[in-house]
Amino acid sequence: MRGLRVVAAVLVLGMSAPCLGQSYHDLVDASEGFNGVALVGTGKHVSFVKGIGWADAGNGVPMLANTRFETGSVSKWIASIVILRLVDQGKLDIDAPITRYLPDYRADTGARLTLRRLMSHSSGLPNQLQEARKDVQSRGVELEQMEAVRRYASGDLAFEPGTAWDYSHSNWVLAKAIVERVTDKPYAALVDQLLVRPLRLKDSGVYRGDSGAVTGIAQGYAGLDPRPVRKPNPVPDFMAMAGGYYTSAPDLMTLMNAVLDGKLLSPASRKALMTTLMPDQHYALGGRVRIEKIGSTEREAAWEDGSNGGFRMLARRVLADGHTVIVFTNASFDYQKLGDLGTKLLDASYAGENGSSDLGD
């Protein structure tokens, strides 16, 4: 399959197509088994974007730079941005007891839970969805949102909110119920209203069920050799905040730029989004913020990772100067290789800035 590849550079963010630097090509090409899209840029400028392999191997659809992908748990970061936009509009307070918004939720725990704790996985709400998702037959079954809350997000707290950390999808089932109750709109419509349309995103939105039905999206695979084997993992609508967002690499860069360097959020909401509440986990709201050695220097970066079915992805953006790497894959690419590729590409972006590599403009 590696011999059958398509390289595509697209016009993004209103800028001319970048000159693709050979070093970026080499790094991606050297990552054995890679099938997906890699993007490197700084701020609004895309230095490199490349699609390799197949978006839909069964039908011979090549991978393009603007191919759409599931984002997995990066959906949680997207959901946090939507919630904070509602905070900026005065419709939500992330430190208010959730019973202010869901008076029919159980009072004993609801009075102790807040959106900030739900979004930072420090609520103590047990992950009742984890066991349920092990049943393959029930994964794509739809439930009305409050019924999903009753089944999967109403358990006794495992610890006092704010005292510990536990990665629980149930947090996002409850957060979605709050957002939809307050706005009287479906979450997918809010994503469109608050993110997609204002930022003119071309390849982003919320799906339900098997993402393979979305136009222009890559199919997820367990592997491609010796033959492609699909690996879908349907996401019901009640889990949309936890894992139902899809996008392309150029769209995600546009969003990161608007959120982290632009005016999509107020300064207070942007600070809340990127302030780690659980330092041992580097976890802020819906995503991580890490200080790592990047380009031989310690730098603070937004650190987003996601997976679902055959999809794996990462996004890294250095907060001080906007150096960005986004990598999407759709054929169960090895996590370690994915992380290594992201690190190498981000390091290379600084090497090119310093003139020590032939990376192109």
Image: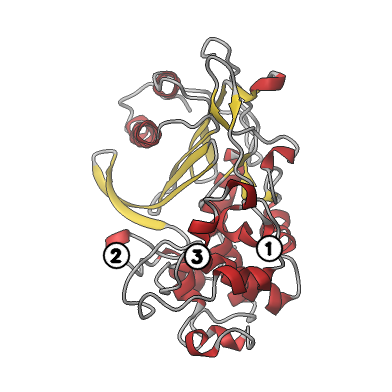
Relative depth, front residue between 187 and 50: 187
Residue 271 position, x and y percent, is 44, 69
219 is higher (above) or lower (below) than 245: above
Q: Amino acid at mark 1?
A: Leu
Q: Secondary structure at mark 2?
A: helix
Structural crowding at the residue carrying mark 1, measured as other residues with C-alpha within 10 Å and reported as few (<14), some (14–19) or many (≥20): some
Mark 2 lies on residue: 279
Q: Nearer the viewer, mark 2 or mark 3?
A: 3
197 is higher (above) or lower (below) than 106: above
Q: Amino acid at mark 2?
A: Pro
- Residue shown at 57%/46% (left/top)? 252
Disc 2 from disc 3: Cα separation: 25 Å
Q: Secondary structure at mark 1?
A: helix
Residue 1: name its quadrant. Answer: top right
233 is higher (above) or lower (below) than 94: above
Q: Earlier in the sequence, mark 2 or mark 3?
A: 3
Residue 132 visible in the current orientation? yes
Q: Nearer the viewer, mark 2 or mark 1?
A: 2
Residue 224: name its quadrant. Answer: top right
Q: Nearer the viewer, mark 1 or mark 3?
A: 3
Mark 1 lies on residue: 194
Disc 2 from disc 1: Cα separation: 29 Å
Q: Earlier in the sequence, mark 1 or mark 3?
A: 3
- Residue shown at 49%/67% (left/top)? 270
Structural crowding at the residue carrying mark 3, measured as other residues with C-alpha within 10 Å and reported as few (<14), some (14–19) or many (≥20): some
Residue 181 position, x and y percent, is 70, 77
Mark 3 lies on residue: 128
Relative depth, front residue between 288 and 202: 288
Q: Amino acid at mark 3?
A: Gln
Residue 260 visible in the current orientation? no
